Image (tube, rainbow, N blue to C red):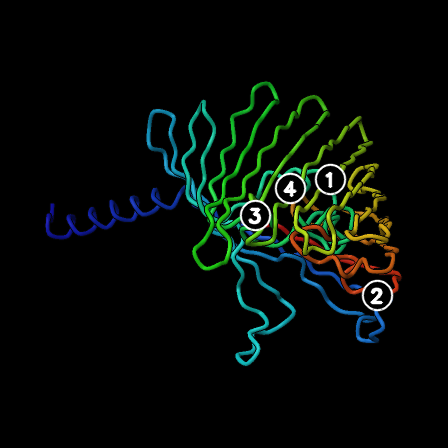
């Protein structure tokens, strides 16, 4: 036996096996949603009436875990968002990679998990679970069916919280609790630490939840903003119905709006690989000041989904929102809905017709 020849081959095999084992718990994942959307918006700007390709929260990332023994695991996730339709122009930087959920944590076999980094809030997470069009061109949070507390990233109650720790309990016969706490960064004018908590129950076709969150604000910044919501979904054979109600307020004398209430109801009917979808909702904004009138909006969506496989689907949908005057001027601190942001001051409609395809990997 030639030891000199055998030894390098053996060491190479051991190293290759070790590298494979180290990478075995790392998963590459992603999401591509590509749609052609015809927009019809009463904005006073002809450029808002357009047909374009839209890549909705397309992303790629890595996630994994390491078994530490005694039922304990180290867990991580690194996720980035991109746009497949627009090149990254150096002068405008229009297509940079954006951070999504990116965190490091520990998971126990009987006490749940703790994660630290940039993490979706429990408030956002429950809203995503009742939206069959989530992360498409006609998702509920983009069409006024859910508030902007389900969108964006930052440390002021955006849907994805930065500088944050989140705890999720294990399931106790379908019952779970979740909480998050954000440490205020040093590069802003506020000294606040936003927080939130929620409880959910999921068992036998029943999913219900309740959430609360606050930015822990004060008069030196944007004021105290808080929001709570309740909702759920019931599935029976081929039918599913879902609903959510949100109530948010802001304690700030300088704010234009002091409260926003948003409601969302809908349902689906599934026939094999095909699903029909319909939803209706709206909201009312409470404006401050003597003689100020509250304004509201209504919105609805209808559509169909066809699953081509477990990971690929196509969809078509039509959605329309009717916004009162001044609904586009309440854009601050989460007390807003994106569907009315581009409508002109005296009110109007925001309509969209979408045909899309989604693939997960």
Left or right: where does residue 270 sit relative to residue 129?
right
Q: Residue at x 83, y 69 (%)?
A: 43
- Percent of width and height locating residue 6: 16, 48
Q: Are marks 3 and 1 in contact (CB under 8 Å)?
A: no
Mark closest to the chain's N terminus, 4 or 1: 4
Near mark 3 (Cα within 10 A), the count class, few <14, some 14-19 or many ≥20, is some
First in sequence, mark 3 or 1: give its number. 3
- Please state which of the two labelled residues, at mark 2 or mark 3, is closer to the viewer: 3
Quadrant the N terminus occupies: top left
Q: Nearer the viewer, residue 17 or 210?
A: 210
Determine which residue is flagged by label 2: 345
Q: Residue 23 at x, y = what percent? A: 38, 46
- Is residue 165 in view? yes
Mark 3 sits on what residue?
A: 218
Which numbered mark, 3 or 1, is in the foreground of this view? 3
Q: Secondary structure at mark 2?
A: loop
Marks 4 and 1 close (CB-CB < 8 Å): no
- Tag 4 or tag 3, which sits nearer the N-term? 3
Which secondary structure, mark 4? strand
Q: Establish if 56 lies above or below 16.
A: below
Label 4 and label 2: CA atoms lie apart by 27 Å
Which mark sits nearer the N-terminus, 4 or 2? 4
Q: Is residue 212 above or below residue 120?
A: above
């Amino acid at each position: 036996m030639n030891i000199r020849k055998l030894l390098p081959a053996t060491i190479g095999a051991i190293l290759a096996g070790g590298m494979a084992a180290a990478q075995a718990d790392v998963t590459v994942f992603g999401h591509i949603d590509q749609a052609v959307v015809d927009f019809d918006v009463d904005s006073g700007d002809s450029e808002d009436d357009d047909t374009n390709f839209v890549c909705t929260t397309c992303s790629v990332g890595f996630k994994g875990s390491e078994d530490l023994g005694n039922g304990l695991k180290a867990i991580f996730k690194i996720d980035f968002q991109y746009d497949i339709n627009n090149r990254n122009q150096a002068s405008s930087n229009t297509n940079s990679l954006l951070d999504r959920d990116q965190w490091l944590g520990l998971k126990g076999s009987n006490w749940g998990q703790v994660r630290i980094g940039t993490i979706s809030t429990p408030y956002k997470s429950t809203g995503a679970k009742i939206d069959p069009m989530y992360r498409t061109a006609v998702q509920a949070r983009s069409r006024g069916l859910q508030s902007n507390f389900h969108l964006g990233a930052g440390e002021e109650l955006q849907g994805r919280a930065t500088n944050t720790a989140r705890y999720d309990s294990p399931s106790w016969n379908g019952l779970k609790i979740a909480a998050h706490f954000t440490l205020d960064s040093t590069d802003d004018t506020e000294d606040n630490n936003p927080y939130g908590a929620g409880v959910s129950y999921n068992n036998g076709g029943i999913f219900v939840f309740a959430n609360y969150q606050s930015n822990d604000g004060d008069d030196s910044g944007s004021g105290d903003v808080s929001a709570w919501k309740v909702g759920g979904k019931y599935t029976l054979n081929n039918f599913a119905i879902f609903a959510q109600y949100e109530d948010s307020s802001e304690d700030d004398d300088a704010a234009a709006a002091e409260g926003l209430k948003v409601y969302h109801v809908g349902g689906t009917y599934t026939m094999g690989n095909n699903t029909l979808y319909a939803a209706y909702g709206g909201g009312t904004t409470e404006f401050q000041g003597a003689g100020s009138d509250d304004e509201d909006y209504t919105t609805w969506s209808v559509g169909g989904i066809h699953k081509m496989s477990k990971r690929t689907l196509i969809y078509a949908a039509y959605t329309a929102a009717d916004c009162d005057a001044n609904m586009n001027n309440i854009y601050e601190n989460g007390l807003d809905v994106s569907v009315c942001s581009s409508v002109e001051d005296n009110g109007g409609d925001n309509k969209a017709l979408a045909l899309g395809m989604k693939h997960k990997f």
